[in-house]
Image: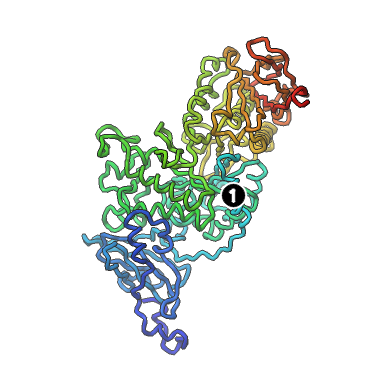
Amino acid sequence: MSKARNLNKSNIPQDEEPFRTLKPVEPFSLFSARDVQLFQEGTHDRLYEKFGSHALTYEGVAGTYFAVWAPNAAFVSVIGDFNSWNNYSHTLYPRWDESGIWEGFIPHLQDRQLYKYFIRSNSGEELRKGDPFANQWEVRPKTASITTQFNYKWKDAAWMKKRAAKNSLASPFSVYEVHLGSWRRPDPENHEVFYSYREIAAMLVPYVKEMGFTHVELMPIMEHPFDGSWGYQLTGFYAPTSRYGPAEDFMAMVDAFHHAGLGVILDWVPSHFPYDDHGLYRFDGSHCYEYADMRKGFHPDWNSYVFNYARNEVKSFLLSNALFWLDKFHIDGLRVDAVASMIHLDYSRKAGSWEPNAHGGNENLEAIAFLKEMNSTIYSRFPDVQTIAEESTSFYGVSRPVFMGGLGFGMKWMMGWMNDTLDYFKKDPLFRKWYQNQITFSIMYAFSENFMLPLSHDEVVHGKSPMIYKMPGDDWQRFANLRLLYSYMFTHPGTKLLFMGGEFGDTKEWNYKGELGWHLLQHATHEGLQQFVKAVNKLYTSEPALYKTQFDINGFEWVHLADQDNSIMVYARKGEEGEVILVALNMTPVAREEYPVGIPWDLTFKEVLNSDEPRFYGSGVVNTGLIKPVPGRFGKPYDIILRLPPLGAAIFKSRKSAKKKS
């Protein structure tokens, strides 16, 4: 029995007289008939206001209302510290409408109380499950949910008012991807100890701001039981992980980013979930959230279970979850994990281990319909945010509007660009002339989607080596190559994403148990690389030609590709007002003096960034003064004469000629 029920009559205040007449669980509901209808149609996007635990007052008595979906249950009760984990003292009521919802009001149950649901299935199986809608959980390895009400007062009204411009596809979008637990640690040797959300914010926010990024992307911060999953195996879809503190502190972190003018993107995982006893798997003794057919319901890549997108109640759960983070936490965007595995029935499955759809194809039609509904709802409710798909196939229209037949995402990761670029830069410069197509090919499809160029955590784990050691050559050449790669990345059409540590050339693979190698910044090579990333971020975010037309084919032009033997490539990024950013890449360690480049414009140029500048630990092959056009000798109306740095990029900005000024 609860502590409240053990009170003596003489201890009951007069204003709580109803306490003596209320039952341990009172029949009460927050659901309207319309709520149930939308839930069963798969279109309810605010279930977090109904399911879970909610503090309220009933018949003059404060307490907590609980609601859980368990359609195969014969009996459901709330158990916790408040009733000594008694399975039978606080039984919930099944709704009369056969919706599978169990609910009830428990008098005097306060905030921050541990609880679970005790469920007996129709088959007699007994389970103890955490609340799928819980807003807080115990710190792993403990698994109870915690009654939690959000009391944070937001202070980011100025950001929220102007963020439509900050998150626009015509604005600079440079993302710093972070794993909160391993960015910095109080004790790098102890992976059980973490900084709090507020402590991390005090260090991370000014760093991201100083480095020139526009957004931060957090690897999944939703509650998860196993650190080694990096957050991608969720049990608490509606709760920030308690590893770093309470939900209000996470809200304060988001607030701090917004005060600094930085957007916050969350990694979101609607594709699969683990089989932990307290989680969603066989929640009520049946395949409640997952497909019953394991050809669709189990994914071998992650040894986890796949959401049943054909079940409307599951679609409402996921739809509401996406909206929950945007609504309650003021999140600016969702990067949706593993979209390719969601929409392809045969993704990473051998022949015979998957079943075609009704038309004989390999598309998961239910998942596709869900993603379209999700994106349509998000952009309807929150038109000033972005959804970003991690999708690695050539599936049509991932970032095209739903009304055009697309999936409706704002952006899509450009995985082909990432693979080709890393493969090219790993090669000895002596042989790069044979592989120039790996650099040029991306432009063939760069404008078929709204692409984000990712160099993510996936590229620096599992033996793939850190970014700096992917580069060939001696120490100087490795850093020159990496500065060159980043030059190419930040001037290529599309938005950008860089995983933490890549900005200063961390020398070890990312390990979630450790922290980044911040000590390396005492070396001029690493400090120079960090300064270059800061500079190229500043260039990208300050030059409209690099971002306003980042998804427009008219904003890009190849200028010089004929010198394949010397692995030199020159291209232009063109702005809406006629400005031109000219990018010259020298992919070999041989400096080129007085190198002629034919151009079609009567424009004067000035170098605005050079990856070989001494301040970046370069050799100093730079261009000074104005570079004026001369009559062309190689088939173009004009030539400009450049110095091309070894393993370097020289980036120029146009100025109108004196003749045109007059």
Q: Using the rendered image of the protein, determine whether residue 520 is visible from the camera's viewpoint.
A: no
**Up-down relation of residue 219 to residue 236 (above or below):** above
Q: Along the line of sight, which residue is nearer the eye, 554 or 68?
A: 554
In the image, 412: left or right of 23?
Answer: right
Q: Residue furthest left?
A: 123
**Up-down relation of residue 207 to residue 642 (above or below):** below
Q: Along the line of sight, which residue is nearer the eye, 280 or 327?
A: 327
Q: Residue furthest top?
A: 633
Residue at 25% x, 35% y is 360
Q: Position of residue 56 (x, y in %)?
A: 45, 72
Q: Position of residue 393 (x, y in %)?
A: 41, 32
Kind of residue at badge 1: Arg
Q: Residue furthest front?
A: 662
Q: Residue furthest bottom?
A: 10
Q: Position of residue 247 (x, y in %)?
A: 52, 59
In the image, 393: left or right of 298?
Answer: right
Q: Position of residue 13 (x, y in %)?
A: 47, 86
**Circle 1 sits in a helix, a strand or a loop, which is it?**
helix
Rendered image quadrant of residue 100: bottom left
Q: Using the rendered image of the protein, determine whether residue 63 is visible from the camera's viewpoint.
A: yes
* Picture quarter with the N terminus: bottom left
Q: Which residue is mark 1?
A: 163
Label 1 environment density (alpha carbons within 10 Å; few <14, some 14–19, many ≥20): some
**Up-down relation of residue 391 to residue 20 (above or below):** above
Residue at 32% x, 66% y is 102
Residue at 78% x, 25% y is 662
Total marks shown come to 1
